[in-house]
Image (cartoon, helix red, strand yellow):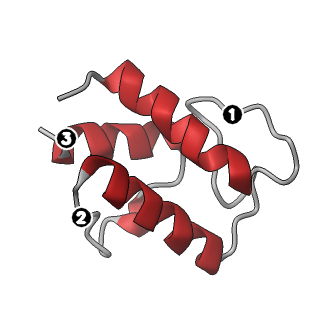
């Protein structure tokens, strides 16, 4: 479908509305530590990502996805 760099770039675009602190977004940007996203914002972001790629992110996978890079890897794997 799309390569990982395109997925990462699109995820960064989807995160931008949630980036209230204006953090520079990169591979190692943490959702909890850097962006300080609460659970509701995380679920909104997950819904946006699932809609974008027509995938389902398993709930048991979400706690393991701590950074934007890890999320991009998971989306790339699920979108194949």
Q: Quadrant of the C terminus?
A: top left
Residue picked out by circle 3: 77
Q: Earlier in the sequence, mark 2 or mark 3?
A: 2
The crowding category of the residue bearing disc 3, from other C-alpha atoms within 10 Å (few below 14, some 14 to 19, many at least 20), is few
Percent x, y for residue 16?
A: 69, 44
Query: What element does badge 1 sit on?
Result: loop
Q: Quadrant of residue 5?
A: top left
Question: Crowdedness of circle 2 by 10 Å Cα count: few (<14), some, many (20+)?
Answer: some
Up the image or down, 1 lies above or below 29; here it is above
As helix, strand or loop, the secondary structure at mark 2 comes to loop
Q: Residue placed at 39% from the left, 38% from the top?
A: 72
The residue wearing badge 2 is 56
Does 59 sit above or below residue 28? below
| Residue tagged 1 | 25
Q: CA distance from mark 2 to mark 1?
A: 23 Å
Relative placement, left or right, of 21 versus 45 is right
């Amino acid at each position: 479908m799309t390569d990982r760099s395109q997925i990462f770039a699109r995820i960064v675009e989807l995160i931008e509305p949630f980036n209230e602190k204006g953090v520079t977004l990169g591979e190692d940007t943490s959702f909890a530590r850097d962006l300080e996203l609460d659970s509701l914002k995380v679920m909104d972001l997950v819904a946006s990502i699932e809609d974008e790629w027509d995938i389902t992110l398993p709930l048991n996978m979400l706690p393991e996805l701590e950074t934007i890079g890890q999320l991009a890897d998971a989306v790339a794997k699920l979108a194949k």
